[in-house]
Image: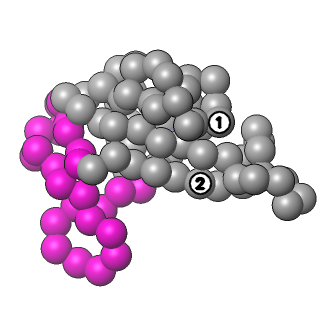
Amino acid sequence: MFWCPGCDGGHRISVGEGAGPRWGYNGDPEAPTFTPSVLVTYNGADAGEDGAPPAVCHSFITAGRIQFLSDCTHPLAGRTVDLPDFD
Ligand SMILES: [Zn+2]
């Protein structure tokens, strides 16, 4: 799990062996890198209700920073921010 400041919520990504999509992980909890990019669609506060297109959160997580791509529907689209601490 990581805390996403764009969505103001947690996103779950899976690493290692197992079912479902898996991401590559550099093994560094202080400056994690996940590959490939993380694409989340959801019915959030900003979009997706009542048949509208879902909200999109699309990011690269590299060395502890989140690079939000321009197709995000939240205000941090196109920006790069530090990955917040999240227990
Ligand atoms: Zn997000």
What secondary structure characterizes most of the magenta part?
Answer: loop
Q: Quadrant of residue 30?
A: top left
Colour mode? Answer: one colour
Look at 19% across and 29% down and name the residue there. Answer: 63
Q: Which residues are magenta?
A: 12-35
Marking on residue 27:
none
Figure quadrant of the C terminus: top left
Q: Residue 68, position in %: x, y?
A: 45, 30
Q: Is residue 32 left or right of residue 13?
A: left
Residue placed under numbered mark 1 in the picture: 73
Query: Tag 1: residue type?
Result: Thr
**Element type at marker 2?**
strand
Query: Residue 14 in magenta?
Result: yes
The image shows residue 86, relative to residue 40, as above or below, that is: above
Q: Is residue 3 left or right of residue 6?
A: left
Look at 16% across and 73% down and name the residue there. Answer: 17
Q: Residue 47, position in %: x, y?
A: 77, 44
Q: Residue furthest right?
A: 50
Q: How far apart are labels 2 and 1 at the CA level?
A: 10 Å
Residue placed under numbered mark 2 in the picture: 41
